[in-house]
Amino acid sequence: MNKYIAALFVLTLAFTAPAEAVDELSLTGQAAGKYQSRDYAGAAVLYEKAIEAGRGSAALFYDLGNAYFKTGQKAKALASYRRAERLAPRDPDIRWNIGILKDTLPDRIDGGSGNIFIVKLNELKQSYSPDEAAWALLGFLFALALGAALKFASGAAQKFSSALVVIAVMGAAVSGLALGLKAADLREPAAVILLREVTAHYGPSDIETKAFVLHEGAEVRVSDETAQWYFIELADRKTGWVPKSACELV
Amino acid sequence: MFVLCAASAFAEVSIETSVSRSRLGVGEELTLDIIVTNAQGKISQPTFGALSGFSSYSQGHSQELSFVNGQSSSRSIYTYVLVANEPGKKRLGPFEINIAGRPYSVPAVDVEVTPDSPGSGGSFQPAAPPGPVYAPPARAMPSGNVGDQDIFVKAWLDKDEAYVNEPITMTYTIYTRLSATFKGFDKEPVTTGFWVEDFPPDKQSRRTESMLNGQRYVTADVKKEALFPTEAGVFTIDPGTISAIVELRDDQFDSFFSSNIFGRRGGYAPSPFVSQVVNKSLPIDKLSVVVKALPEQGKPSNFTGAVGRYTIESSVDKREVTAGDPITLRVRVKGQGNINTIEPPTLKKLDNFKIYDSSSSANISKDRGVVEGEKVAETVLVPRRAGTFTIPALSFSYFDPKIGQYKELKTSEQTIEVHPGSEPEDSAPIPSPGIVPASQEDVSVVGHDIRYLKPVSRLEDISGPVYRKPWFGALAAGLLLFAIALFVVSARQNADQKDARGSRIRQSHSAARRRLKTAHSYLKKQDRDAFYAEISRAVYGYFADKLGVPSQSITTDLIQERLSASVSNEHLVSEVQALMNALSVGRFGRVEMSAAEMKDLYEQADNVITHCEKAKFQ
């Protein structure tokens, strides 16, 4: 049995071990230099290049957001900050900058649920990332397997096994629920309006009745799409179709 | 407007009583005129005592002399203002008046006082219009339609050019050849770019007569406003449209006699033949004004926009206090200008004192045709420690538009004597060595911006959340299944262990029966050794299973002990003992046994096992 446990250890480690990308890191260094010399557009280009390689981090998205914000591209900045926030949900700097940015946006979309339970649940959901929940679930499942394996051991290890199993089952249930909530949220991708002003229609065409007007930086959820249009929903449950070119998925 | 007339019997003297209205509400007023015409000699004041249901005020006495067609006539008018106090039908008078020593009776007049203001319905006459009446000289009064030349309003400014925040007075003057009443604005004035202060209406409208284009007009200022420009530029002021009620009469002769040339309020006897009351809108020409910016040259650094002429003074409510007791510092800025917008100087920071936010109050007066007043800022100071301290002079600067220069004022310094308080002082006394704590203030945010870059030290896969990767589901499911499988296996093992003894007990009887059956077959074959061995195995095995011990450790004593402990059946105990003895004899004694003895032994063993089962031996 110990053989299996060892194998599992190796398996988990194999998935978490990071591989450094030195080239991209040097790009971000150059970008930071440009940012410091107030060449924000140049910095944004370099940060984008670093991200295009397929790897990134909360800090990188945050820096890109800063560069966009300084060049006045609030929507792109917000999208970038949101990506950073997804990777590092409790980072105070990201939250601060999002707050500053949102203060400058013209649209006030009030999701306003007065229910304290829902408010607290949403706050809680904001405080962890889906990856954190996923890794926690894997960890607890692993602990469960370990606890089950320890039942075959003798003496003190066997007594420890029951406690481990109880903790692992509860942990797995909680982290599974957390992951489920997060996954439900992410099933409809978030998007940010890029254009200075865009009119949402009642159908996926310009000739459909106009529903409402959104401005740059407005945050929406995309719940359906056609070839050219997204069906979006606002926090206050207004829905409409906007052209795909008008928004960027986060 | 409602007149009762009674000619006195004597000579040409006639005495009339006239009231301005015959119906009025409680709290409203009417004017009562006693008009004495052609009286010769001295006229004494009418005996005008208290009237029940009215408060009365004398408005004075006037005299008129006129010559018409070579005949002279004189009129003496005594005017009273009566305020109705209670409802009901009232008779005013009769009064008495003494002319040249002779008493004359003054006719009474009836009025009706309604509980509240009389409505327009039911009354044949229009309600008395509000506001002052500008009565023109009767001679000039035309009849027929009201022309634009008969009545018009002009608005004028006292200056065409002003500095920002310098008051400009806008006056509305009515020119009329008719009897007219100012009602209000049909269209409100548009004064964008100005702070407006209304002057209260003149109590005694100055009325003058003037000649304009060969016509005689009564003119009066009906409204005055002070305009404070808020920014520089050329502005057009639309003074709006004024609405007036104009009274037209067609009986010129009557108006000729009953009117008086003084334009006294309600003083002339109105004609009963009023033919028309016309509402007239009087548009006013637009005005333009140039607002100059304040000069940059010589602008003091502490200038906050005050324009006008001011004085400043400061005072403290206490000059001697104990440490910790509050002192109020008052800074009073007084003068002419837009008092509402000036900011008196306040103390910002002072060593040895705690300063609390100041409050300010303004007191504005507009009675003298200018906007003036004072603004007082109060600051509460709490001395931190004992000593003699000086509150520094505060400076205030303003722009004087008359001379076109900035002026700076300073308050006097205030010296405060602070005695040591009973409570411990805020900070340590000076001579004590060590650390003196700083006086602390809240950190205030002076600007808002995003936070700076973060160093990027590590990059990770960002192609999507971990839970969407295919391996994640496989790994999670694998771990879960693996754990479940381990549980199943371990649970089964556990169950087996727990079950081993129970099944042994459960199966003890059937095992023994099986062996007895085998033994019986050996009995038939007369295979003695095999028979004994099988019988022994059956009995010993049976008891070993029942007691949960290996069959080697079964002894007669052990069985007896457990048997007597669990079943109180002496007969069964002796039976078992007999069987055991027989078995040991049969096995070890090597005695030749007959078939009958073997059968006996078999039956004995069978009985014991049956009885043990019946007795539920455990």
Image: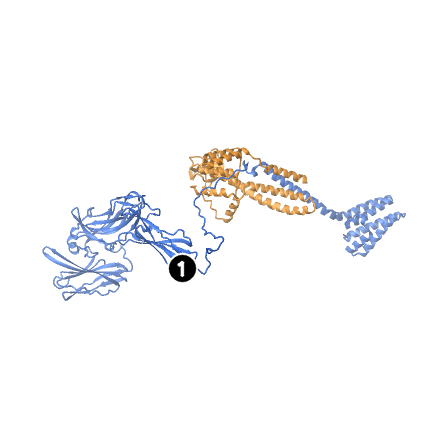
Q: Residue at x 79, y 52 (%)?
A: B612
**Viewer-nearest residue: A26 or B327:** B327
Q: Residue at x 50, y 49 (%)?
A: A116
Pinpoint residue B20: horizontal percent, then vertical percent.
Answer: 22, 58
In screen coordinates, is B448 left or right of B78? right
Pinpoint residue B567: horizontal percent, then vertical percent.
Answer: 78, 55
Q: Amino acid at mark 1?
A: Val
Say above or below: B441 vs B80: above
Pinpoint residue B532: horizontal percent, then vertical percent.
Answer: 85, 46
> How is colour applied across the structure in the image?
by chain
Tint of chain B: blue
Question: In which chain is the residue bearing label 1?
Answer: B
Residue holding disc 1? B321
Locate the N terminus of chain A by quadrant.
top right
Q: Kindly give the residue lying farthest to the right in the view shown.
A: B592
**Viewer-nearest residue: B124 or B19:** B19
Tint of chain A: orange
In screen coordinates, is B112 left or right of A7? left
Residue B600 in sight from this viewpoint: no
Pinpoint residue A3: horizontal percent, then vertical percent.
Answer: 67, 39
